[in-house]
Amino acid sequence: MPNEDNPTSPSGLDVTKLLAELEIPFPPDQVRWRVTNTTNDKKRGQVVPYADPRAYTDRLNALFTPQGWTREYKVETMSNITRFKKGESIASGKVLVTCTVTILGIGSHSGTGEEWADDENCMTSADAQAFKRACSCLGLGRYLYDFPAIWVDLDQNRQPVRAPALSAWALPENWRKGMRPSARTGNGSGASSNGPNGRSQTNGSNSPKGSGNGHSPAGNTSGSASKANGDDLDARILCMEKRVGTVLYRNILREYGRVNQPKLIRDAAVKRKVLQILESATRGFDRLDDVTKRLDPSTLTSLLAKLQAPPLAEIADLNTLQHVVLGLEELAGQINTTQHNHCLSASSNNPTFIAQDSHLSKGVSDGRSTS
């Protein structure tokens, strides 16, 4: 008869054992590296590991058989979105995919993926994102989120000259022996970044002196406080979705946190950065609301067409938000100047978006991939 320590599903599966098997890292030969950011000269770049969707499918088939699990996709599209690509503004769209993975006798989880519609293989990319994110909720591939971005030398094709060596804890045999990344064990032995702008995870410089297992001699008060602070950040980030819109919210999480849910961000500094960017975006929308209130609907439609801007509800990235706010403020200022016969130029009456919101401008310039 099953007990609480080893629960079984209605179909008789040992849930605890199977979920533990799902969490085991992929074999090293199935791990690949993606360049997410580069230096200005393109000679060095930050890379993060990933695995092909087939590796996820093989694991699920091996544990549950092909008949023991399913996946369902829901596809949505958004059109008439202005995108800045290679320094030019182009009309594009978004492909939004939701994938639901169901393991019979265990349960279901969903994940989302998205890609620009003008990108080659956009549907394949969005499908893969959604599928892998759904799998990570079940533990499969979840360990890949625990890697810090690593700086490496790039070849002429902007690909790593040599693949980085995997951490010992990321090897299947060591994982089975109980090795885990420092972010999970709390032992302060995290890997450090080795290049410009890399996120350093040093061992214990800000931690209380203790027994070496991440706890202070007085107990886990520090850990509880840290968790409470993280939960507060998660809640504040989640509240931003309604204020900035779902598409922009997801894009910011993906671009600055490389996740689709704030709770998956393990680095508190990154979580604060994401919140800061979202707060800056809300200030941008506040300015947008202010300028649109001064314009009648027909004038607003005309100005947006002149700016080649998307509908305001479909703003999907910070560059577009900045472009629309600056453009509308300038054009509205010109209209106001003409109507009131002012001698001052519109630009002098409307300080730039960057000057008024240095946090947002910094987020746009410092945190974005240049690849």
Image: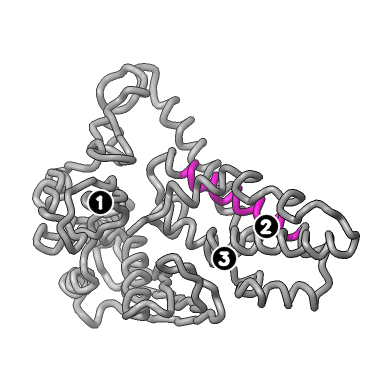
Tell me: 142 left or right of 276. left
Instruction: List the residue tagged with mark 2.
Output: 285
- What span is colored magenta in the figure? 271-289
Q: Could you tell me the amino acid type at mark 2?
A: Phe
Q: Secondary structure at mark 1?
A: strand
Under circle 3, the secondary element is helix
* Residue shown at the point (54%, 58%) measured from the top left: 318
Q: Which residue is mark 1?
A: 45
Query: Mark 3 sits on what residue?
Result: 246
Between label 2 and label 3, give the one nearer the viewer.
2
Count residues near mark 2 (Cα–Cα under 10 Å), then give few for <14, some for 14-19, many for 20+.
some
Which residue appears at 56% of the width and 80% of the height? 80
Q: Position of residue 153 (x, y in %)?
A: 17, 49
Task: Give, as a three-letter code, the residue at label 3.
Answer: Thr
Q: Nearer the viewer, mark 3 or mark 1?
A: 1
Q: 358 or 75, which lies in front?
A: 358
The reply to whether residue 176 is in sight is no
The mark that comes first in sequence, 1 or 2, is 1
Quadrant of the rendered structure where residue 333 is?
bottom right
From mark 1 to mark 2, how far is it between C-alphas?
A: 33 Å
